[in-house]
Amino acid sequence: MRGPLAGWRLPLRLAWRDARRAKGRSLLVLVMIALPVMGVAAADTLYSTQSVSGVEGLERRLGTAEARVSLAPGSREAVQDADPDTGVSAVGPRREPGRATLTDVERVLGVSDLPAVELETESTRAATDDGQTYVELTGTDLLDPLTRGLVEPVSGRLPRTDGEVVVNADLAERGPGVGEELELAGGTRLEVVGIVESAQGRGFPMAWARPAAVEGQGAGSTLLIGGAAVTWEQVRALNALGATVLSRAVVTDPPPESALPPEIRGFDEGVDEATVTVLALVVVMVLIEVVLLAGPAFAVGARRQSRTLALIAAAGGVPGQARRVVLATGVVLGSLGAVLGLALGLLAAVALTPVLQGFSTTRFGPFDVTWLHLAGIAAFGTLSALLAAAVPAWIASRQDVVAVLAGRRGDTRASRRSPLLGLVLLGVGVAGAAYGASGGGEIAIAASAIVSVLAMILLVPVVVLAVSRLAGRLPLPLRFAARDAARHRTRTVPAVAAVAATVAGVVALGIAVSSDEHQNQGTYQPSLADGYGLVTAYGGGVDWAAYRDAVARTVPEEDVSTVQALVLPVEGRGFRQLEVAQPGDSDPLLVSVGGPFASATLVADRLPPGLPGIDATEADRASRVLASGGVVAFASEAVDGARVVLRTAEYSGRGRVVDRQRLEVAGTYVQVDGDYSPVDAVVAPAVADRLGGRTRVAGLVVDAPITEAAERSVGEALTALPGQASLDVERGYVADEETVVVQLILAALGAVLMLGGTLTATFLALSDARPDLATLSAVGASPRTRRAIAAAYALVVGLVGAVLGALVGAIPGVAITYPLTGPGSSGTTGGPATYLDVPWLLVTGVVLGLPLLTAAVVGVTARSRLPLVARLD
């Protein structure tokens, strides 16, 4: 048969007419297609916006200059990538001391009187209201046209003289504002005349002054130059002088790979293959999810078109033409959903850009829309709609034409081969997960997850049928819902599978994230007892009395204790090493030792405060031993004994042992929590003398509640003193903010997708079952019965899908814990072979809570009365 039905024109007209008539169902399909398209489009646009390419970042690095030339004294020949910030190296012998000058640059470029301005950056300390803080100080002339674009003025004006400076908001909040003086570490005082923000980043103290204020690199080591464009040949000529060059012209039009120096090729190896693989797997999972969510709507639509399709078949149409009519609905709704999703995604990206910028210290680039990516995302949305309509189209082409025209259902019998194939795929998924857990890696586990989900989809019809047969003794609403779901599997199976796929992903990722967090918590090694603080310092000019006074201004003086460390001096370049052991046993007492103190062995006549994992009884016993001139040794396992062996070995500067000593003294052993201790022993002063050692201050232990604000104030007060001192407060293990955010996103995503899928499938089913519900009303069923049936259908779809999804999601979820948390994954020793933590609260909420909530929502919102219609339509 030829004519209009041979092509797509008539099917598309029928699809457009059906979409306009069934506005509610069409809207559901549009939402199912548009939501994932919107999410992916927004994510792609936000990623492109926050990612600053070399060309986009030129103005914030160069201002209006043509190039930035960095000159190093006595350097070797430089080799660099087109952008030196992405790859640079040095070759050849080191030159005599001396640095190339602006005159040398002019000679290479072949110009004289080259426009240039100095640009120097150093890290220094500056005074604040509470002491001092480290500041990134940039010396340049911000009034020069070449520097326009390096900063964004906020208030005030730019520096005009060597005694003026501008600061960013982060530094201004700590003390010196406009009209005040900024005092640098060397005593230099600069008047703050304005507040600006860097065009590259924020979130840490920064200041800009004239070049004379910067002393770190020396005048003229970095220059911004104007004039004509600097070519790649000129860049290589400047490299020969030991200079690296960021050229606007070269970054905008980079040389081919073959023109790069051999030493620099391959620095940028592109996207990691594993990342691409995982991204592809995520796209496949999202595609499956969208197909399953939209599938029930197309199934109901095909049911409504069954009489039209039967008439086409009766008029001589072939099955392929019937399939084309249903697929045309996918084309129409998929295209509309993709366009709507793209529009909403761009609007969402515009709204979220300033929000995400607030969480990042790096400045985003310009709003960037990658139209090629968006075209692919739109094609993805249309393809998902076509795939969602494929199964209903295939079923519609095989319906019983006579039965449909007679007013009966024309469904075909379910395939017996699909469940068998599902069992085979499930076995493959389990085997793949086991292979990945035993060493195959995360990619194998991710692939097995997709195979397991596909297997589950094929097994859903069997599970739905089994539930309907087990529902014989249940109340009428549940029995009706279970049997109706089994009778109309074309719309029930995709809905259950969609819920199951969602739950499987949430459970798998939830187990992975929770297990990783469980490992982080289990392997966390505190340096001090919870709530204690430790002041340490290094460098010259250490003044512990001044540090103590600075801390005492915030906490009481009696809560600050000085801790002494043992030092074993030797002559020359050698060193002495101390080992603590049990008499008659050479094995180490601790699996891991070392921490914030200057030495692993402390000296005291009582146990120093703040050591972790020691209770009051053990602390009293240890203090009595030290008071009597003994030794307290720490061990990973329980050790009985009253004698401790101290062995020292002296090494020469070449690493050879030149002397050994052994000292056995009275002592006691304290078992620590886990395998780690910040110190291996505490010895009495008399024992330190017998070892030939001396003491030095290891730090100040603070036993007082210290808030984060107080910690920052004390830190700035210590920074103002010589010696580079700092305060660290032990607050126990704190979950990473990103982990908490991921867990919340998983819960929210699972809830939204599961609620959306279940509600969509339920209301579509109720729309399709209106003749059955009307018959119930005709035989005397009360209005609340329909509400109960609606709630029961939501419960059947949601609960069956959630249980299946949890079981399937546990396969990759448990498997991924082996490579993720197995031995060596955290860089620590000891502990279990793998960490497994099932987030039972999340699983219970998704498997039980959400189906019950969905059933309640449906029961409340469903219509209790329906107009009487014919039983058969």
Image: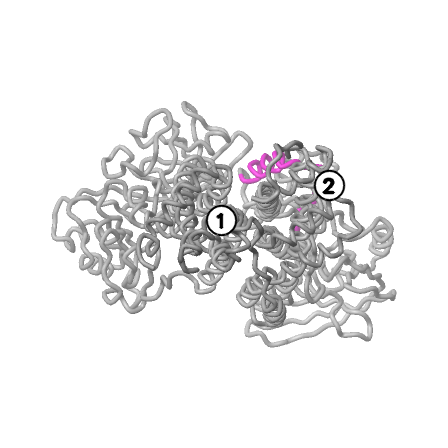
Residue at (27, 66) in percent of width and height: 261
| Residue type (three-letter) at the residue carrying disc 1 | Arg
Q: Where is residue 163 shown, x and y percent of the image? A: 34, 30
The residue indicated by pointer 2 is 703
Gap between marks 2 and 1, in whole Å?
82 Å
Task: Tell me the tag on residue 370.
Answer: none
Circle 1: element type: helix
Image-quadrant location for residue 446: bottom right
In front: 94, or 697? 94
Task: Tell me the tag on residue 307.
Answer: 1
- Confirm whether residue 598 shows in the render: no
In front: 405, or 365? 405
Q: Where is residue 805 shown, x and y percent of the image? A: 64, 56
Q: Nearer the viewer, mark 2 or mark 1?
A: 1
Does 474 appear above or below 583? above
Query: Which residues are the magenta region?
Result: 696-719
Query: On the picture, is 707 further left or further right than 396?
Result: right
Q: Where is residue 744 shown, x and y percent of the image? A: 61, 44
| Residue type (three-letter) at the residue carrying disc 2 | Asp
Does 477 appear above or below 163? below
